[in-house]
Amino acid sequence: MIEDIRNRQKHPSVFLGNITPIIRRVTLLDPAYLYDVFASLDLTIANKGTLKSADTFLLLNPEQGYLGGLDDQEIVTTVRGTNTGRMWQLIRPLPPQSEISFRTEYHFEGRLTFHPNFGKLWTIKGDSPLDDVAIEWTVFADSAPPRRSRVTMAELGFISLLNQFAPLHSSH
C-alpha cells in the first residue's frame, strides 16, 4: 500500500477524461435499413496529478468499425505501426491539473430494425446489439503504468443520437 502511494507520487495521473460522440452523417445503404454511420469523437485527456506528463499517448481500439482522419494536428500526431486500433501522441507536455481535447472520426455500419415492444433497435455485424459494442482505450504517460478501460456505445449515448438521424416506420 505504501509502495503504491509512493509510485503515484513519481508518475503523472493521466487518463481519458471524456469521449463525446457527434453524429455527422447517417446514410441508408440498402432497403433493409443498413446504415453507414460517420461520427466524430471529441476526446479529452486529463492529468489530475501533481506532475506533468512529458510523453502522453492515447490508444483507442473499437470492437467494430474504424477510426480515421480529422486529427487536430496542432494537438496530436498519429503514431504509425500500432497493431490494433489507432494511437496518438500529444505534441506538447500535459501540465498537472489540466485537460486537452482533440477530435477524430469514427465510422461503422449499423442495421436499424423496429420491434413492436421495444421500438428502434440498432445492431452491428452479426446482429450484435450496438449498445454492447465498446471502444477500449489505453493511456500511456511517461513511465507510469498504462491506464486501461472501455466504454460502450450505450454509455456514450450513441443510440439516442442515431435515432435522431435515422427514421424508421413501424410498417417494416
Image (tube, rainbow, N blue to C red):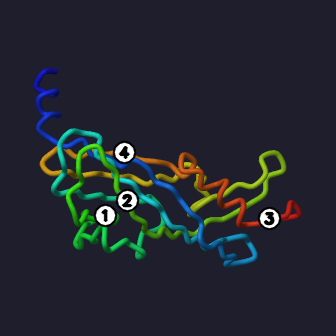
Report how far apart the C-alphas of labels 1 and 3 lie in the structure: 35 Å
At numbered mark 4, what does the secondary structure look like: helix, strand or loop?
strand
- Between disc 1 and disc 3, whose residue precedes? 1
At numbered mark 2, what does the secondary structure look like: helix, strand or loop?
strand
Report how far apart the C-alphas of labels 4 and 2 lie in the structure: 11 Å
Disc 1 and disc 2 in contact, CB within 8 angstroms:
yes
Q: Nearer the viewer, residue 74 or 33?
A: 74
Q: Which residue is mark 2?
A: 61
Q: Amino acid at mark 3?
A: Leu
At numbered mark 1, what does the secondary structure look like: helix, strand or loop?
loop
Q: Please, which residue is most extreme toward the top here?
A: 1
Report how far apart the C-alphas of labels 1 and 4 lie in the structure: 15 Å
Q: Position of residue 141 (x, y in %)?
A: 20, 51
- Between disc 1 and disc 2, whose residue precedes? 2
Identify the mark at residue 168; answer none if there is no mark: 3
Query: How many numbered tags mark residues here?
Result: 4
Q: Amino acid at mark 4?
A: Ser
Q: In the rendered view, tell whether residue 5 sits above or below residue 106.
A: above
Residue displayed at 23% across by 66% down: 91
Q: Position of residue 137 (x, y in %)?
A: 35, 52
Mark 4: give few (<14), some (14-19) or many (20+) Cα within 10 Å: few
Identify the mark at residue 84; answer none if there is no mark: 1
Q: In the rendered view, tell whether residue 29 sits above or below residue 153.
A: below
Identify the mark at residue 149; answer none if there is no mark: 4
